[in-house]
Amino acid sequence: MAIFIVRHSVQLAMPSEAPTLTVSSGSELVGKTIRTCGLKDNFGIQILGVQQSSAGEIVFNPPESMPLVEGATLVVMGELEKITKLRSQA
């Protein structure tokens, strides 16, 4: 029995209208992990990607153990009303 491994290289583009949250200085999110930050449990917001710095790559499907840092941009999915409310708190 032969096993074949097929590898694909895919480039993903970020739509300009994708909802994002920025972790601001002094935010309660700084230093917490995706698992412990409470966005999913408290607000029903999924973190689809994280860009740790403005020049950094976006990590899609980030591990729940990833810590959130000041200035990180979170690509999120959830109710727009909740995302808008969180923008003032992040």
Image (cartoon, rainbow, N blue to C red):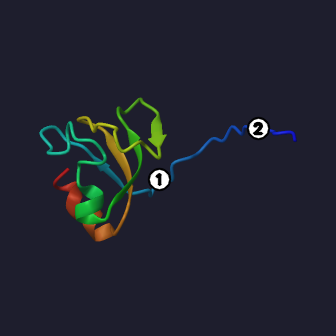
Which dot, 2 or 1, sits closer to the camera?
2
- The residue most toward the left is 26
Q: Is residue 42 above or below residue 33?
A: below
Expressed as whole percent of the image width and height from the top left, the position of residue 79 reads 34, 69
Q: Is residue 41 above or below residue 16?
A: below
| In the displayed structure image, the side of residue 16 where residue 72 appears, left or right | left
- Residue linked to disc 2: 5
Work out how far the residue at label 2 is from the one at label 1, CA to CA, in angstroms: 34 Å
- Residue linked to disc 1: 16
- The residue most toward the top is 55
Density class for disc 1 (Cα within 10 Å; few <14, some 14-19, many ≥20) is: few
Residue plotted at (47% across, 53% down): 16
Evaluate whether residue 78 shows in this view.
yes
Mark 1 is on which residue type? Ser
Secondary structure beneath dot 2 equals loop
Residue plotted at (46% across, 39% down): 59
Residue plotted at (43% across, 43% down): 62
Evaluate whether residue 84 shows in this view.
no
Expressed as whole percent of the image width and height from the top left, the position of residue 23 reads 24, 43
Marker count (numbered): 2
Say which label, 2 or 1, has the lower sequence index: 2
Rendered image: mark on residue 77: none
| In the displayed structure image, the side of residue 70 where residue 47 appears, left or right | right
Expressed as whole percent of the image width and height from the top left, the position of residue 36 reads 24, 48
Residue plotted at (15% across, 43% down): 27
Within the image, what quadrant is residue 31 found in?
top left
Mark 2 is on which residue type? Ile
| In the displayed structure image, the side of residue 7 where residue 58 appears, left or right | left
Secondary structure beneath dot 1 equals loop
